[in-house]
Structure formats: C-alpha cells, structure tokens
Amino acid sequence: MKLDKYTVGKRYGKALFELAAEAGQTEPVYEDLLQLRQIYQEIPDLGNLLSDVRLDQSAKTTLMGQLTAGFEGIVKNFLLVLQRYNRMADLPFVIDEYEKRYDQEKGMILGQVTTAVALAPEQKQRLEASVAKRLGFEKAQLTEKVDPSIVAGVIVEADNWVIDGSVANQLAKLREQLK
C-alpha cells in the first residue's frame, strides 16, 4: 500500500523529533530543518528530482553530497535515509510535522484566524493570548486571513479545533432554526 505524503510526513517527522529529543538536539535539528525548508522553497523541484527513480544514482549521490554538505549528525543521516527510500519529495511534510511537535514542546500552538477585516496588532495579540489560554498552551501564533464573506466576528482554526464566531455562521444557524 502506497502511503500519501501527509502520512509519510507524520511518521518520519515524529521519528525525527523523537530521535532529536532523545539526543537533546531538538533546537539545532529544528534550525537545520528551517534551512532545508528554505532550500526547498528556492529549488521547488529538488525533492522530486532526488526521489525520481529514473535519475542516475551517481547524479543523485552528487546532488545529495551537495545538499548534505552543510549538515551534520542527525539531520545528515536522516536526509540519507529519506534519499535511500526515495522520500526526499516528502521532506516539506516531514518538516511541518517536526515543527508542529517542536512548537508543542515549547508550549506554542500555530493556527489561523479569519476575519472580515484585518485585525489591529493589539487585537491580534489579545486573540492569540485568549486562544492559547483556551486550548491550554503558553502562546499562540495565528496567521491572519481576511474574508469579507464572514460579515463580522472571527473564525479560529488551531490544533484540530475550529471556533466559529462569525456572523455568517450565526445567521446560518438562525436560518436552520427558523425552518
């Protein structure tokens, strides 16, 4: 059975995080992964190229040598494992999972807030503090999205939670009750 990229990302990200935690290296591994994310953003086809079974092995070895040159220990070995199993295209999903676990370890939750108009900085700070407290984290970091169709209010999505306080949602519920 072929695994989808999200499942692969979760499994490999979890394994990498546990390995880094066991070695007391979560911070340096995280910093290396941020560098790798940047490389993948600059060269979007790199993962697919390194996972392509049609590419000559010597060419892959050369590319991997260049990629791993800036890394040591856990990250370098992990990259070689991903390459051996043709999973280099899944690295961005592995990094996402690692980052999620890293943030949780640090007491931070990532999420998204949708509003009808942009939030003022102090409103965003208050909302982040409220979300963190409500979900049991020390801090929350919310990415803003503006969607005028919600009319007013906010929709917060974080850690498998959706808190929909939009006027559009309240009106939809009211319509259902009136039927």
Image: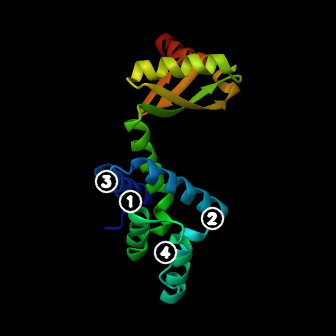
Query: Could you tell me which secondary element the residue under label 3 belongs to?
Result: loop
The CA distance from mark 3 to mark 1 is 22 Å
Q: Circle 2 is placed at which residue position?
A: 44
Sequence-wise, the earlier of marks 3 and 1 is 1
At label 3, which amino acid type do we have? Answer: Ala
Sequence-wise, the earlier of marks 2 and 1 is 1
Dot 4 surroundings within 10 Å: few (below 14), some, or many (20 or more)?
Answer: some
Q: Circle 3 is placed at which residue position?
A: 23
Rendered image coloring scheme = rainbow
The CA distance from mark 4 to mark 1 is 14 Å
The CA distance from mark 2 to mark 1 is 19 Å
Q: Circle 1 is placed at which residue position?
A: 8
Is 144 situated left or right of 9 in this image? right
Can you see residue 151?
Answer: no
> Cβ–Cβ below 8 Å for labels 2 and 1?
no
Q: Circle 4 is placed at which residue position?
A: 51
Is 82 situated left or right of 46 in this image? left
> Which residue is farthest left?
22
Image quadrant where residue 133 sits: top left
- Front: mark 3 or 1: 3
Q: For the point 70% across and 25% down, which residue is it?
A: 148
Q: For the point 59% across and 62% down, which residue is it?
A: 40
The CA distance from mark 4 to mark 3 is 28 Å
Between 145 and 29, which is closer to the camera in this rendering?
A: 29
Compared to residue 9, the image places residue 174 above or below, namely above
Sequence-wise, the earlier of marks 4 and 1 is 1
Report x, y in % for residue 71.
Answer: 49, 65
- Front: mark 4 or 3: 3
Query: Could you tell me which secondary element the residue under label 4 belongs to?
Result: helix
Can you see residue 10?
Answer: yes
